[in-house]
Image (cartoon, rainbow, N blue to C red):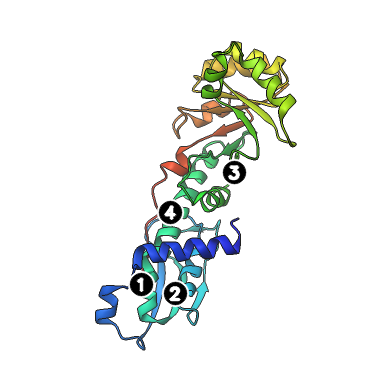
Amino acid sequence: MISEIRLRKLIKEALHEDIGPGDATTSALISEEERARGVVVAKEAGVLAGVDVAAKVFSTMDPGCKTSIWKKDGERIGVGETIMVVEGRASPMLSAERVALNFLQRMSGIATETARYVEAVRGLPVRILDTRKTSPGLRMLEKHAVRMGGGFNHRFGLFDGILIKDNHLSVLRGRGVGCGDAVRMAKSRKTHAVNVEVEATNLDQVREAIEAGADAVLLDNMDVEEIEAAVKLAGGRVILEASGGINLDNVRRVAETGVNLISIGAITHSAPSLDISLE
């Protein structure tokens, strides 16, 4: 997950964004000495992620507060169940409430959406992956949430894998470099041990990529029949990843084609937040 130092910095930035020079409402109404007990409750069933992050938000605002965690990341939660209890000064608790819930709701929403996809392909030898389509600055947290939902992480950034995409190929075509040539170029020039994957939109590109020695081929926006043909063509010689146009209605059918991986941007960029409140 994210480092402790980076997480603390992220939390402080989020609190500053929300509170600014001060919580005008709480300052006007609540004394510094007043104490409270807050219960974080699920209003919707799902899979939790970000519980520890939410607890750190409260403790950042009030180092003297006590947080009792009842449910952990990766656990399923039902409507009305308690996730954590926070006890301490009322003023900082109220000021931290929205930021803590934003992290918890966002991450739990991603974990829950991921779990739906994982459940949809249960029993098949395929992994559900995320993508780099994450919220700026929150990638490590959102990818942690994917893991809590039973999914797996694709690249964390541009540094930990070579993925030759259509725009790379478009630029290269301007100087007569095709898909296969791009793979060979990447393999010969890579500076450290990373896999070379290439995006393919048709079977000719799949064939070129395999013959050039690609470690993996991303089948971009192919229909089920094309994916089946690609699986047959590959014959187990390369890792195949399906991506694009995949949703809960068709993900199992895609998985049944025999691909190894299915990457879904929607589990991070479009997952609805889980309904959670502080009472």
Instruction: Quote the CA–CA distance across marks 3 and 4.
Output: 19 Å
Quadrant of the image occupied by residue 218: top right
Residue at left 61%, top 60%? 3
Q: Earlier in the sequence, mark 3 or mark 1?
A: 1
Determine the CA span between mark 3 and mark 1: 32 Å
Tell me which numbered mark, 4 or 1, is placed earlier along the sequence: 1
Q: Residues within 10 Å of mark 2 (few under 14, many from 20)?
A: many
Pick whichever of labels 4 and 2 is earlier in the sequence.
2
Q: Position of residue 81 (x, y in %)?
A: 43, 65
Residue that carries the numbered disc 1 in the rendered image? 95
- Could you tell me which residue is drawn at 33 percent across and 71 percent down? 21
| Residue toward you, 146 or 41 | 146
SS category of the residue bearing label 3:
loop
Q: Which residue is mark 4?
A: 106
Is there CB contact under 8 Å for labels 2 and 1?
yes
Question: Could you tell me the amino acid type at mark 3?
Answer: Phe
In the foreground, 17 or 106: 17
Mark 2: secondary structure: helix
Rendered image: mark on residue 156: 3
Q: Which residue is mark 2?
A: 61
Q: Earlier in the sequence, mark 3 or mark 4?
A: 4
Mark 4 → mark 2, Cα distance in angstroms: 20 Å
Whether residue 186 is situated above or below residue 154 in the rendered picture: above
Mark 4 or 2: the one toward you: 2
Give the percent coordinates (x, y) of residue 232: 65, 15
Residue at x 69%, y 17% (from the top left corner): 210
Residue 57 visible from this viewpoint = yes
Q: Secondary structure at mark 4?
A: helix
Q: Is residue 240 above or below residue 1?
A: above
